[in-house]
Amino acid sequence: MTTWRTDPHLAGRFHPQYPDDLQVMVHDGEPRRTKLAPEACWVRVTGVAGALYMPIAAPDASPPISQSAVRWDQRTVYQGTLLNAPHNLRTIRQNDTVAFVFAPGLPHPVLVTSEYGGERRNWCITPCNGCGADQTLDPMTTMARTRFPDTPAGTAPLAFSALCPCGGTMMLALVGQ
Ligand SMILES: [Zn+2]
């Protein structure tokens, strides 16, 4: 199955001669934490890795968002082989298997880790008011530690805002248990 070739989110992104190759934004996490910029690298898609589950809060919900106040969206997670070597990144190498999702607002689909996917389902992200981005580069608890380094372990904030590279702002809110 080559479902990625017909995914409307990925339409027009594949190389004209290599119908499974597209550019993905690969990264080591938030540049604010890692001091390393994301890089666009070619990836040869090999399959579907699963789905990214994303809770969406009602506009008037206040954190912690209750489970009953969210609706669910999901996005296909694809996997593939990294064809070229990133210039500066430390966590991924040429020929590694990487997972990625389509991400509005970003120039390319973006690399996601299993840790990221595990946290993304616990956080509502109000898309960036500048570009509409609804994904981040670090898991949300890692982002919280970057922003609030003095907070005791295990006491992440219920909600916080994050600057988007485009200059806009996204709001992140924890879904309560
Ligand atoms: Zn943005």
Image (tube, rainbow, N blue to C red):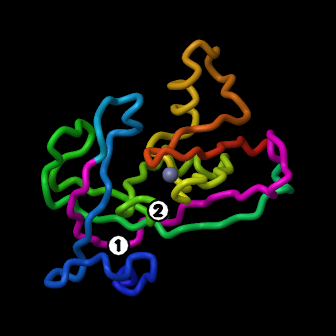
Label 1 to label 2: alpha-carbon separation: 18 Å
Name the dominant secondary structure of the magenta segment: strand
Q: Is mark 2 within 8 Å of ligand 1?
A: no
Dot 2 crowding, Cα within 10 Å, few <14, some 14–19, many 20+: some
> Which kind of residue does numbered mark 1 sit on?
Gly
Residue 1 visible: no
From the image, tell me which residue sits under label 1: 47
> Vertical placement of 108 versus 35: above or below?
below
From the image, tell me which residue sits under label 2: 103
> Vertical placement of 126 versus 152: above or below?
below
> Vertical placement of 68 versus 19: above or below?
above
For the C terminus, give its image quadrant: top right
Query: Is residue 123 toward the left or the right of residue 112 in the image?
Result: right
> Which kind of residue does numbered mark 2 sit on?
Ala
Q: Secondary structure at mark 2?
A: loop
Which region is colored magenta? 39-65
- Residue at image coords 55%, 54%: 130
The answer to if 41 sits in the magenta stretch is: yes
- Residue at image coords 14%, 84%: 17
For the N terminus, give its image quadrant: bottom left
Res 92 quadrant in image:
top left
Q: Secondary structure at mark 1?
A: strand
| Residue contact between numbered discs 1 and 2, judged by CB atoms under 8 Å | no
Residue 112 visible: yes
The answer to if 54 sits in the magenta stretch is: yes
Q: Position of residue 48 (x, y in %)?
A: 41, 71
- Residue at image coords 49%, 47%: 136
Res 59 quadrant in image:
bottom right
- Residue at image coords 40%, 28%: 33
Q: Position of residue 20 (x, y in %)?
A: 24, 78
